[in-house]
Amino acid sequence: MDIVEQKQILEVFRQLIEMSQRRGCWMANEMEHIGLTYNRIEMISKGIEKYEEEEMNKKMAADKGKDKTSKVKPVKKKESVKE
């Protein structure tokens, strides 16, 4: 299971908690635990987003480095002047 799939699962679980709460599925004494779980899901999701962003930035930096080395202009030979 890759990170994108894990992120999607967490998002569905977060939505499930929100929907259940709106429908009154939880008893008052259960809300503390549900809230803690919800906050953990949010924290993990943000961590995944930060990780994805850092990886993308690393890849872009590496690609820029490759572009600079591959775009070296060839040196032209100077023609000698005959008198």
Image (tube, helix red, strand yellow):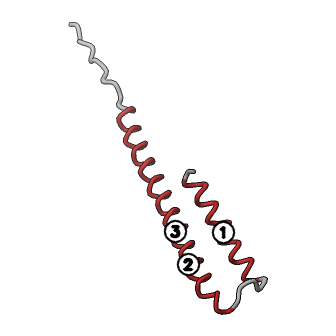
Amino acid marked by disc 2: Asn
* Residue 78 position in % (x across, y down): 27, 18
In this rendering, the answer to whether 69 lies above or below 13 is above
- Going from N to C along the chain, the mark reached first, 1 or 2, is 1
- Kindly state the secondary structure of the residue where label 2 is placed: helix
- Going from N to C along the chain, the mark reached first, 3 or 1, is 1
In this rendering, the answer to whether 53 lies above or below 18 is above
* Residue 54 position in % (x across, y down): 44, 57
- Kindly state the secondary structure of the residue where label 3 is placed: helix
- How far apart are labels 1 and 2 at the CA level? 12 Å
Between residues 15 and 36, which one lies in front from this camera angle?
36
Q: Quadrant of the C terminus?
A: top left
Residue at 63% x, 60% y: name it.
8
Q: Judge left or right: residue 24 versus residue 48.
A: right
Amino acid marked by disc 1: Phe
Amino acid marked by disc 3: Ile
* Residue 42 position in % (x across, y down): 56, 73
- Going from N to C along the chain, the mark reached first, 3 or 2, is 2
Residue at 27% x, 14% y: name it.
79
The residue identified by callout 3 is: 44
Count of numbered marks: 3
- How far apart are labels 3 and 1 at the CA level? 12 Å
The residue identified by callout 2 is: 39
The answer to whether the residue labelled 1 contacts the one labelled 2, judged by CB atoms less than 8 Å apart, is no
Local packing at callout 3 (Cα closer than 10 Å; few below 14, some 14-19, many 20+) is: some
The residue identified by callout 1 is: 13
- How far apart are labels 3 and 2 at the CA level? 9 Å
